[in-house]
Image (cartoon, grey):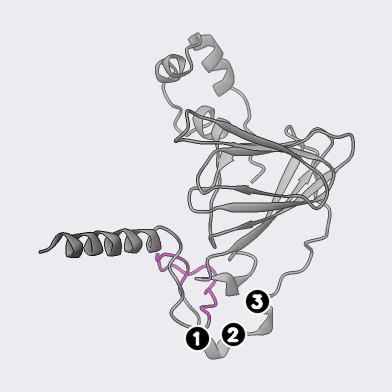
Amino acid sequence: MSTHSILVTIAIMALASLVSASDPSPVQDFCVAINNSAVFVTGKACNKPKLATTDDFFFSGLLTPQNTLNPIGSKVTPINILQILGLNTLGISLARIDFAPYGLNPPHTHPRATEISVVLEGTLYVGFVTSNTDNRLFTKVLNRGNVFVFPESLIHFQFNNGKTNGVALAALSSQNPETITVANAVFGSKPMISDDVLAKAFQVDKKVVDHLQAQFWYPNN
């Protein structure tokens, strides 16, 4: 095989791996999910297309303010295939994030999605940390109408640094992006991670780890 052919083959394989790294592309017009389906697939099992209705592609209530009276002062309202069955296989979802004054959407990741957010109300301090540039922090203060992108799977956060309520709308490149909140996962895992492991990882006394593991880690997502 010539060098040119080898390079072409490698390029094709690389492109194929990129394609398979996100939600699968649909192979039909739509695939309205069968809610509570017992079939385990990538996404939910499809209902018969002739049984689809307009309501399978509809959601109302996005403008309704959410309750942020919780320990972190934020509330995430996801809009994915659990709310819109017609999103199944389409590789996209939404989320509304409400913030109390000085409320925080804690550092977290979406293992399957890039996120793009727009601020609808308030002023948000946002940022993400890279993995390939020595944990570099990219931050920005966003005002109403500003847009910011959080690359797929990187740790990121949003903090309302104003005295008024804040609201952001996020679009994500997966029908089921999932959320791993860092503190919740590390200190609130079930069963708990050994305090020997965490004490060494964070270079703190085990009493500090035990204190953190004893806290209630609020699931705002």
Above or below: residue 58 compared with residue 23: below
The image position of residue 60, as x and y in percent, is: 77, 68
Q: Quadrant of residue 35?
A: bottom right
Above or below: residue 122 compared with residue 16: above
At label 1, the amino acid type is Lys
At label 2, the amino acid type is Ala
In screen coordinates, is 113 left or right of 149? left
In screen coordinates, is 62 left or right of 182? right
Of all residues, the one furthest to the bottom in this rendering is 50
Label 1 secondary element: loop
Q: Are marks 2 and 1 in contact (CB under 8 Å)?
A: yes
State whether the magenta stretch is mostly helix, strand or loop.
Answer: loop
Of all residues, the one furthest to the right in this rendering is 164
Give the residue displayed 46% in from the left and 75% down from the top. Answer: 26
The image position of residue 163, as x and y in percent, is: 89, 34
Q: Which residue is mark 3?
A: 57
Observer-nearest of 88 and 5:
5
Closer to the observer: label 3 or label 1? 3
The image position of residue 21, as x and y in percent, is: 40, 57
Q: Which residue is mark 1?
A: 48
Q: Which residues are magenta?
A: 30-45
Q: Based on the picture, tell me whether residue 217 belongs to the magenta stretch.
A: no
Q: Quadrant of residue 87?
A: bottom right
Spatial CA distance of label 3 from label 1 is: 15 Å
Of all residues, the one furthest to the left in this rendering is 1
Residue 198 visible from this viewpoint: yes
At label 3, the amino acid type is Phe
Q: Which residue is mark 2?
A: 52
Label 2 secondary element: loop
